[in-house]
Image (spheres, grey):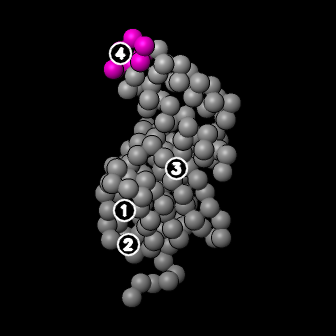
Amino acid sequence: MADNRSVLSVSIVTPDGRVYEHDGELLVIKTKLGQLGIMPNHVPVISSLEVDEVRIKHDGGEDEVAVNGGFLEFSDNVATIVADSAERQDDIDVGRAESARDRAQAAIKKAQEEHDADTLARAEVALRRAINRINVANH
């Protein structure tokens, strides 16, 4: 039987350094295969991540982090997320994210008109990242 006093140690790192570190009772994350909830004593997991929010529930509260791709490794109640980039909810500049969204939408429109598949793909990723940041900031 699982130890009810167990907690998860959650760490989110990017090439620029550690973005988040906290203990929690539940980690909710979107992988390439779908949404995954991890509680203490979960089986080990390694998975690629989607551009989406990561939610960490702890002490009656919840933290949200905008994660832009990467992967998750979980074992022995330690969850490590290595992300391409990540921002804590309180650190997101909504105005900057909205500007990025608008630029991405304009780039998508231009790429579609010019039938430029490479630019279109990059602009669609930029749009997903901007929308993710806006959604996390507004929760």
SS at mark 3? strand
Q: Position of residue 138 (x, y in %)?
A: 67, 46
N-terminal of the pair, mark 1 or mark 2, is: 2
Q: Nearer the viewer, mark 4 or mark 1?
A: 4
Range of magenta residues: 111-119
- For residue 53, the mark is 3
* Residue occupying image coordinates x 56% and y 49%: 65
Could you classify mark 1 by the number of other residues whose Cα lies within 10 Å: few (under 14), some (14-19), or many (20 or more)? many
* Residue occupying image coordinates x 50% and y 83%: 4
Name the residue beneath numbered marker 1: 74
Circles 2, 3 touching at the beta carbon (< 8 Å): no
Q: Is residue 79 visible?
A: yes
Q: Nearer the viewer, mark 2 or mark 3?
A: 3
Q: Nearer the viewer, mark 1 or mark 3?
A: 3
Q: Nearer the viewer, residue 139 or 41?
A: 139
Specify the amino acid type for callout 2: His
Name the residue beneath numbered marker 4: 116
Number of labels in the image equals 4
N-terminal of the pair, mark 2 or mark 4, is: 2
